[in-house]
Image (spheres, helix red, strand yellow):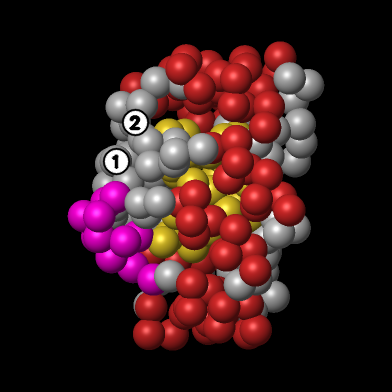
Amino acid sequence: MAIQIAPSILNADLANLAAEIRRIPSADWVHIDVMDGHFVPNLSLGLPVVESLAKSIALPMDCHLMIEDPDRWAPGYIDAGAKSVTFHIEAASKPGQIAKDVRAAGGRVGMAFKPGTPLTPYLDLIPLMDMILIMTVEPGFGGQPFLVHSLIKVEEARREIARHGGQIWLQVDGGVTLNTIERCARAGADVFVAGSAVYGAEEPNRMVAELRAKATDSFGS
Ligand code: DX5
Ligand code: ZN
């Protein structure tokens, strides 16, 4: 599978979100961080903003739900115009049902793990998903340092995905920069979220290309 880059808008100028997203035309996705102030101690944006963005941007939206009760909310993000929605396993009541509902709405579904959540109890759910997201920081804020120990879980997830034929995407999110992306790719990640690295760069679109080149060189090596 080709390497994919999904810049997170959390560190973009949120008052000019659509214009900020147009600065990264070479990205594969735009990663939209949805936070409810309960599942994580921060509040960002939600359904109405996603619905408005869908009308004015060309990039597909990858919505990362850091919210309680994703069972109730996840499919609505596809109805609102997102192409992919990722829920946190820690917040889900019936993850298998969420996967079905999101797919029935016509979207891709991802399952996310916080740094402290082990993969092992949830291995049976992996083949039901289109993507697994291994958080490489505690969710809630952009610009945090990369947690190196989470790479063990990325490797573990890659092995599981390989067991199921290798089609499921493996995303990393948090602290992904030019300094850390190679290690993530070597551990088996193929979809990379980068927030502050991209929007903190002078030329965000060029940073997308640089991140992609590093990840492509290191993937599987
Ligand atoms: C953190 C979010 C991330 C974050 C990434 O809770 O899920 O998507 O915005 O930002 P950086 O790349 O700055 O860690
Ligand atoms: Zn995110």
Three-letter residue code for mark 2? Pro
Q: CA distance from mark 2 to mark 1?
A: 6 Å
Q: Are marks 2 and 1 in contact (CB under 8 Å)?
A: yes
Does residue 97 appear in the picture of this structure? yes
In the picture of the structure, the residue carrying the numbered disc 2 is 115
Under circle 2, the secondary element is loop
Q: Is residue 138 left or right of residue 24?
A: left
Residue 16 position (above or below residue 104): below
Q: Earlier in the sequence, mark 2 or mark 1?
A: 2
Three-letter residue code for mark 1? Glu
**In the drawing, what numbered circle is on residue 138?**
1
* Point 66% across, 22% down: residue: 161
Q: Position of residue 171 (x, y in %)?
A: 56, 39
Q: Is residue 37 left or right of residue 21?
A: left
Q: Give the magenta part as a residue range.
A: 35-45
Name the dominant secondary structure of the magenta segment: loop
Q: Is residue 26 left or right of residue 38?
A: right
Is residue 118 inside the magenta stretch? Answer: no
* Point 38% across, 78% down: residue: 14
Under circle 1, the secondary element is loop
Image quadrant holding the C terminus, namely top right
